[in-house]
Amino acid sequence: MNSVRATDAELREIYNNIPPAYDRANRFISFNQDVKWRADLVKTILKYCTKPKIILDVASGKGELSYVFKKVFKENYEVILTDYAENMLKMAIVDDDKVLASFDALPFRDNAFDVVMSSFALHASDNIEIVIKEITRVSRKIVGFIAMGKPDNPIKRIYLSLYLRFLMPYIAALAGAKARDFKYIYYIYRRLNTNSYFRSVFHKYIDVKVYEEKALNLFYFVVGYPKKEIYN
């Protein structure tokens, strides 16, 4: 099953009102596709959970994914942002409840949220299986996330290593950012497992409805139902 694409009108509204503090790092590593992918993620989540009432944004950063969700879904619902970086929550671009917590130990009861979602964050985990187990534990309906992976193809791995280590930081610098602030992304990428490993973890805990790899397989895009029988 393919993801649901955001319409041109929806993307136009998001771009026209995008806050100055919107995440610039992911703009560079996603080849300027981060906003579109977030909108596609929201649309795909809403295909499988049409009337969410309470949503958890895991490793939310400044709330960029929640910001896009509000632009796409106009009905009443509650969002909670959670991140382990207090400064990120303080700089949030959305006015929602915030909880300081790590994604590998979410301080919520089982089945607490209709939707649990995340964007451009899970690759920071030292143990992705623990994180996936946590987000499926607290979701009662649907989970959806985008994060950086690593291609199974060795040629693509080499190309992306060179891009992330040498080229991307200086592209960022040309856009007014500090090159050194982007070099850490290469070190995260270097220690990642390949996407075949991630797929095996996802299928263990999630009834996957959508799985896609994007940008030379540098990112994975996942939406599915949590497998509750694994906790019984």
Image: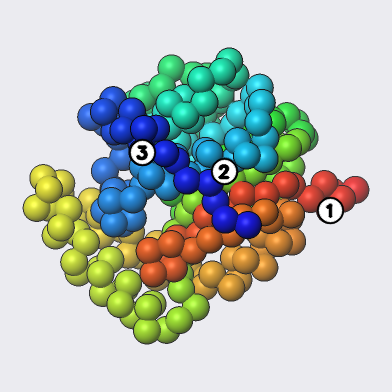
Q: How many marks?
A: 3
Q: Residue at x 36, y 24 (%)?
A: 93
- Pointer 3: what residue? 8
Tell which circle, 3 or 2, labels the residue nearer the N-terminal end: 3
Neighbour tally class for label 2: few under 14, some 14-19, many 20 plus, Cα within 10 Å: many
Left-right relation of 151 to 230: left
Q: Residue at x 44, y 41 (%)?
A: 6
State the image coordinates of residue 141 (x, y, percent, origin top left): 73, 37
How many angstroms separate mark 1 from mark 3 (CA)? 40 Å
State the image coordinates of residue 205 (x, y, percent, origin top left): 73, 55
Q: Which label number is shown at residue 143?
A: none
Is there a contact, CB below 8 Å, between mark 1 and mark 3?
A: no
Left-right relation of 142 to 80: right
Residue type of the residue flagged with mark 3: Asp
- Pointer 1: what residue? 230
| Quadrant of the rendered image containing residue 208 | bottom right
Examine the rendering and report whether any part of residue 101 can be seen.
no
Q: Residue at x 37, y 84 (%)?
A: 155
**Against 166, is 66 above or below?**
above
Front disc: 1 or 2: 2
Looking at the rendered structure, the secondary structure element under dot 2 is helix
Q: Residue at x 73, y 29 (%)?
A: 112
Q: Which label number is shown at residue 44?
A: 2
Tell which circle, 1 or 3, labels the residue nearer the N-terminal end: 3
How many angstroms separate mark 3 from mark 2 (CA)? 16 Å
Neighbour tally class for label 1: few under 14, some 14-19, many 20 plus, Cα within 10 Å: few
Residue type of the residue flagged with mark 1: Ile
